[in-house]
Structures are given as structure tokens and as C-alpha cells.
Image (tube, helix red, strand yellow):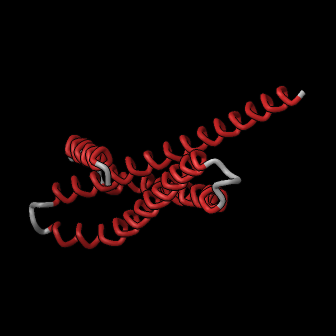
Amino acid sequence: MEHKSILIQILYMAISVSIAYLGRHFITLADLKDLTSTLQNVSAAVFTLAGIWVAYSYPEAIARFTNPKKFSLIKGTEQTQRIRSLVLTIFSSAFVLVGIVLFNLLSPYIQHLFKAFDLYSYIRIAGISVINYLSFIQLQAIVRIMSNNLEFIYSLMKVKAENEAHDDLSK
């Protein structure tokens, strides 16, 4: 992982814990039920969408590297970066889905175990922090999908302009 990515994750964690700490007195884990449901649906959709993009892009990227005479290697490198971003998006969404499943699985047990102690407010902060952090990860994945879509449109427009310029020169 790059230093920038690590710093972003640390920032997400710090913001998640800060928000949870500020809301510890009035937000309950039950209040997060709708958010976890939405997060699960969005994660599954992004996971699927990114998977479709990889299925579309991967064969073309491999062709660029295996047949450099036919394809531009620079475009192959751009395609590789796009696929890398999409795979990270899939991984992020899968991580969020696993996090939600574990949260839903462990939350009742942890709440029950620590209710007898005076640690329940810490458990609430931890639970809210986890959901906040997963939300930030999923938002980042959505932005990556949007960015990849914009790059794809840009690539199409660039190819169209190159083809039109080539056609104009051929006349």
C-alpha cells in the first residue's frame, strides 16, 4: 500500500472515531440498521458493476501487452491502471460486505457480554466507528467507479477525435 493510501485510511479511521465519539450519547447501534442495509446494497451493486468493468477491460488489456505491435503500450498501461483501480474497488466492496456480515454477527454477542460491565459506551463508540469507517471505504469505491466511467468516456472521445483527424487527413 502506498503512503498516501495508508494516510487516507488513517484519516478515515480518525474521522469515524471522532464522529462516533460525538454521537455516543444519542446514536444507538439500532439507529445504524438502515445505514448497514443501504451499505450492504450499495456494496453489492458496486462489487457487481466493477466486476463487469473488469470482465470487459481485462481481455483488451491483456491483448495490448501480448501484442504490442498491434496496440499502443501506453494505452495498455492506462488500461492496466484502470483495471487495478477496478480490482481495488471490488476488494473494497468485498471488505465492506465482510465487515457488515461480521458486524451483524458479532454485535449482539459483544453487546450482551459487555452490558454487565460499564464498557457499553465504548462498545457503542466502536460499533458506530466501524460502520462509519465502512461507509467511508464504500464512498471511496463509488468515487473510483465514477472516475473510471469518466476515464472511459474520455478514452472514447479521444479515439473518436483521433479517428476523425485521421479521416480528415486521408481525404
Compared to residue 112, the image places residue 32 above or below, namely: above
- The residue positioned 70% from the left and 39% from the top of the image is 156
**Does residue 67 appear to the left or right of 109 in the view shown?**
right
Relative image position of residue 123 (x, y in whole percent): 20, 59
Q: Report if residue 161 is visible in the image.
A: yes
* Outermost residue toward the front in this view: 69
**Does residue 105 appear to the left or right of 110 in the view shown?**
right
- Quadrant where the C terminus lies? top right
Camera-side residue: 88 or 123? 88
**Does residue 160 appear to the left or right of 87 in the view shown?**
right
Compared to residue 27, the image places residue 54 above or below, namely: below
- The residue positioned 35% from the left and 56% from the top of the image is 30
- Quadrant where the N terminus lies? bottom left
Quadrant in the picture for residue 126: bottom left
Relative image position of residue 165 (x, y in whole percent): 78, 28
Quadrant in the picture for residue 149: top right
Relative image position of residue 45 (x, y in whole percent): 57, 56
Q: Report if residue 16 is visible in the image.
A: no
Camera-side residue: 162 or 106? 162
- The residue positioned 45% from the left and 63% from the top of the image is 94
Camera-side residue: 14 or 104? 14
Quadrant in the picture for residue 74: top right
- The residue positioned 45% from the left and 56% from the top of the image is 88
Camera-side residue: 79 or 148? 79
